[in-house]
Amino acid sequence: MMKIITNEKETYQLAKELLPAFKKRKIILLYGDLGSGKTTFTQCLGKLLNIKKYIKSPTYNIMKRYLINEDELTNSQLKYLIHIDAYRLNGGGEEFLEYMFDNLTVIEWAGNLEVKFPNAIRIDIEVNDKNQRIFNICSCAH
């Protein structure tokens, strides 16, 4: 599936549309250049999951964990939104596998990891010459 997004409101709508699939698959792999909208997409997911904390890119921490609101937790059985930024990594990734059970995990720069994530949803984000974001979504492995 491909979607052209022109603003944050449309990014939120796309995240809302995809959330049921995310709850099933639990791992989202985000690919795209700097500034393409990977963190904005994750922030929109956080809003949908009623996460109260501000979500920012964990580039230096590499991983952040956000508690999902209890009402949402009851409906989805998810405990946390795990946000991983693999920008500064080169290989590996096995150390993150233990966090992925019963959580929704978003991995920015997933291509920098060696580990394969079966049953993940891959989203490639490109920015065109009109400053629009083109989201290419496929339910395939890394």
Image (tube, grey):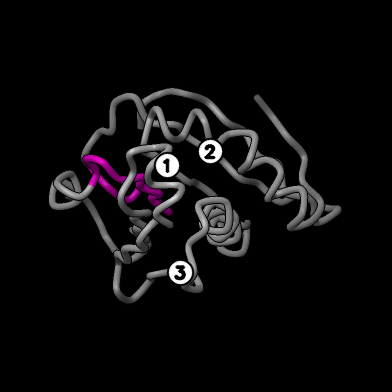
Q: Residue at x 34, y 58 (%)?
A: 84
Residue 97 sits above or below residue 23 on the image? below
Q: Which residue is mark 2?
A: 123
Residue 67 sits above or below residue 134 on the image? below
Q: Which span is picked out in magenta?
A: 100-114
Q: Which residue is mark 3?
A: 57
Q: Secondary structure at mark 3?
A: loop
Q: Residue at x 38, y 29 (%)?
A: 25
Q: Secondary structure at mark 1?
A: strand
Circle 1/circle 2 CB separation < 8 Å? yes
Q: Residue at x 25, y 56 (%)?
A: 90
Query: In front: 83, or 53?
Result: 53
- Crowd tier of the residue under label 1, counting other residues whose Cα lies within 10 Å: few below 14, some 14–19, many 20 or above: many
Q: Secondary structure at mark 2?
A: strand
Tell me the CA gap for discs 1 and 2: 6 Å
Circle 3/circle 2 CB separation < 8 Å? no
- Which amino acid type corresponds to the residue marked 2 in the rendered image? Ile
- Image coordinates of residue 104 in percent, x first then y, are 36, 45
- Which amino acid type corresponds to the residue marked 1 in the rendered image? Leu
> On the rendered image, what quadrant is the C terminus found in?
top left
1 or 2: tag closer to the N-terminus: 1
- Which amino acid type corresponds to the residue marked 3 in the rendered image? Ser
Seen in the image, is 96 located left or right of residue 66?
Answer: left
Q: Which residue is mark 1?
A: 29
